Amino acid sequence: MENFIGLISFLVLMIAGYLFGSYAERKHYKSILQREEQYRNVVLMALRLPRVSHVEHTQLVSGSVVISVDYFKRFLASLRMLVGGRLNSYESLLDRARREAILRMQKQASDMNASSVYNIKFETSSISKGQKDRVGSIEVLAYGTAIVGK
Amino acid sequence: MTDDQEPMPSQNPVIPEGINAVRENPFKELLLLTTGIAVALVIVSLVLWQSLSWGAKFIPLSWEMRISDSIAQQFEDTSEQSMMLQARLDHILQAMEYDGKVPLQVHYVDDDLVNAFATIGGHIFVFRGLMDILQTDIGLDMVLAHEAAHILNRDPIQSLAGAVGVQLVVALITGNGDFGQMNGIIDMGNQLMFLTYSREQERVADAMALDALASLYDDLTGADELFVWFAQDDNDAPEFLSSHPLPDARIEAIRNRLSQ
């Protein structure tokens, strides 16, 4: 009986994780693509020193995202960890997080009429570090120097 | 800013999708991984089960007793039935030419269950329910000889070792194994009662039992008494049948032997 309840709750969590997770992912990618188009003119540069003249002022801009993995993805990853290979289920999650962090940074830059952001860096940190049986969540932080021209 | 540098881009490039994250149906991956891992798991379990069962026969019977003694103590009794059964068993063991280095003990269990089983450490348990059914001496001796044959063939420890191996694999994979349990086999009391044997092990034990009975009785008629009862009354059988399958086939084997 105990095993049966365990199996049912596992299936419910898997199905819920898959349905909500894939719905959220589709919706998020749609939004990401649309906003990337919107902020395409806020130029992102990894260079440390700006190559623009007439700089009015510069300012630190940042975008931060905290994401959590769903049950389905976590189970898939735990199976994958037995045999090795690409963790596809986590890759899409982190891809979304990085792009979302950049978009939030771009929005901040755009709000102050900046034309570009230089010296972009990423930070990633795990929030549920090393805790067994906890759903993993991580933060992705993107930051850079916004250049506001005249 | 110097003139030889390329001009500053006016907008961000469109980066193609599907490089950092592959967009494919995760169900495909789930299916592939689960089947692959399940197959590997079954193979590892089988290998471990087979090799442990094979290797277990090299464990001396006296070592088995150390594991089982604490359980057997609970059943220690000096009732009339136990003494009677023990006397019969000793008689049968003589017929089997057992060297007697490790004593085999039989315990009477006051319970309705129609069952008798042999477990590790040379212990045989006979339930009241079974004794009530068996009317003849030879019927009871057949059961005792059959269980004694299991012990002499080292079937209980082989069955247990195989089961422990499979449990180990399952515990390793699911990650919630209680490895303390591996030390305290005592926790597996249930398992010691319901060790299962292969058909081959049952066949060999039947044959050994009949050999022993042949030297004790002039006529083997009635040795199949218990199996006949099970074949008639299969409502009551499941628990016993789970460890002693196919009564019909075994009656036939015994009858063949009788007709020789």
Image (tube, coloured by chain):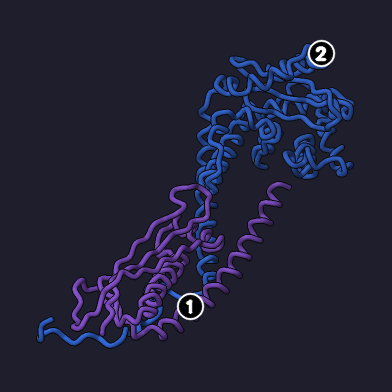
- Amino acid type, residue under disc 1 in the picture: Tyr
The vertical placement of A110 against B193, above or below, is: below
Q: Residue shown at 83%/13% (left/top)?
A: B80
Residue that appears at 66% across and 61% down: A12
Res A102 → quadrant: bottom left
Q: Colour of chain B?
A: blue
Q: Is residue A105 above or below residue B170?
A: below
Give the alpha-carbon distance from disc 2 to disc 1, as whole Å: 78 Å
Q: Nearer the viewer, residue A97 or B132?
A: A97
User: For this view, does B13 lie left or right of residue B193?
Assistant: left
- Residues B124 and B38: in front is B38
- Residue behind mark 1: A29
The reply, left or right, for residue A105 in relation to residue B170 is left
Under mark 2, the amino acid is Ser
Quadrant housing the N terminus of chain B: bottom left
The picture places residue B59, in percent across and down from the top left corner, at 52, 27
Q: Is residue B44 above or below residue B70?
A: below
The residue that appears at 21% across and 71% down in the rendered structure is A48
Q: Which secondary structure lies at badge 2?
A: loop
Residue B75 visible here: yes
Report x, y in % for residue A1.
Answer: 73, 47
Q: Nearer the viewer, residue A17 or B52?
A: A17
Foreground label between 2 and 1 = 1
The spot of residue B178 in percent (x, y) is 56, 37
Report which colour depicts chain A. purple
Q: Residues within 10 Å of mark 2 (few under 14, many from 20)?
A: few
Q: Position of residue B218 (x, y in %)?
A: 80, 23
Residue topped by disc 2: B79
